[in-house]
Image: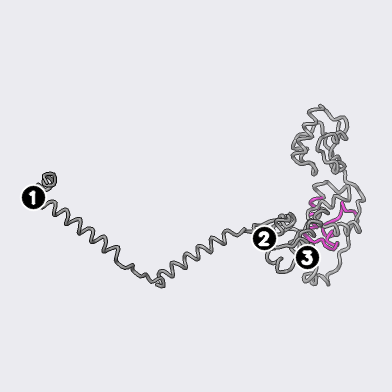
Amino acid sequence: MKIFKSHFWYNKNQRNGVFLLVLIIVILQVFIFADILEKDEIIDINTPKLLAFQNQIDSLKAVKIENREPKIYPFNPNFITDYKGERLGMSLEEIDRLLVFRKTNKYVNSKEEFQKVTKISDSLLDKIAPYFKFPDWVLKRNQNKDYNAILNGVEKSRYKNKPKHIISTTDINKATAEDLKTISGIGPAFSERIIKYRSKLQGFSFKNQLNEVWGLEKEVVDKVWAVFLIIEKPIIKKINVNTAEFKQLLKNPYIDYELCKKIFNYRDEVAELQNISELKNIKGFPLDKYDRIVLYLLAE
């Protein structure tokens, strides 16, 4: 009893303090249990605000899913692989037709040609054609085709009653722009382009040089040679490859910057070319252009 009595031997103030502490603990416990036992509040999920918020979440999810889908970027249809073609929706047969066509070293230059080669459906063509990206020179050539088609169709009727021009010469090196325009497929633009290129060459020395005129198709070239000939070959002022300066050599219409560097490097190695045919010894020299390059060069 003495042991227990020692623990309860407090004065009045101490007993009041203990009583107050116990009372505070009891009150706190009552609040805690009352909050736990309180029924959960029922939330109405059909309120306009919540519905609007849910719609916003659904929209963001849809955008995210759409972004996961592979995007189609502009591409050149000539270089479609099996994997790329399959992703675009092409069948194996359609892809194989394109690959066989490409093995002949030919290219499709319009969506119409692509469909003609692959034989894809109109619906698939409409789906993927907007992503076709052809080189700029192809687009310009197609524009020229459209122009010539208009000229040979609707616009051609304007010239039906005009007197036909009589060519002044059959020598291609003396032909005027008006002479060249008598050829079907050659209008003002092409006639001026041919004359400008002829001036750059100092005159046509070989028939195949006409094929080098930008945008001029083989069928039109054949029509030109059916009327015109190289009667008088041009007298070209040649430059000495052993003494020519870099800029002088670059004026040769068949020599670009890289080839010019190779010629100068070779000239430094041998000190002097004894014969112009030594150009063939240069590594990487375009042998297919040799006969045209030497029209403007000599070795002295």
- The amino acid beneath tag 2 is Tyr
The quadrant in which residue 54 appears is: bottom left
Q: Earlier in the sequence, mark 3 or mark 2?
A: 3
How far apart in space, not on screen, are marks 3 and 1 (Cα)? 105 Å
Q: How is the image coloured?
A: one colour
The one of 108 and 101 positioned closer to us in this rendering? 101
- For mark 1, does the 10 Å Cα neighbourhood hold few (<14), some (14 to 19), or many (20 or more) residues? few
Q: Residue beneath label 3, please?
A: 119
Q: Is residue 218 visible?
A: yes
- The amino acid beneath tag 3 is Lys
Q: Secondary structure at mark 1?
A: helix
* Above or below, 91 relative to 293: below
* Above or below, 252 relative to 118: above
At which x and y percent is residue 217? 82, 57
Q: Residue beneath label 1, please?
A: 13
Q: Earlier in the sequence, mark 1 or mark 2?
A: 1
Q: Residue beneath label 2, please?
A: 131
**292 on left or right of 19:** right
Residue appearing at x 47%, y 64% in the figure = 57
Bounds of the magenta span? 171-197
Task: Please check the rendered image and state whether residue 108 is part of the magenta-colored stretch, yes or no.
Answer: no
* Above or below, 275 relative to 116: above
Q: Secondary structure at mark 3?
A: loop
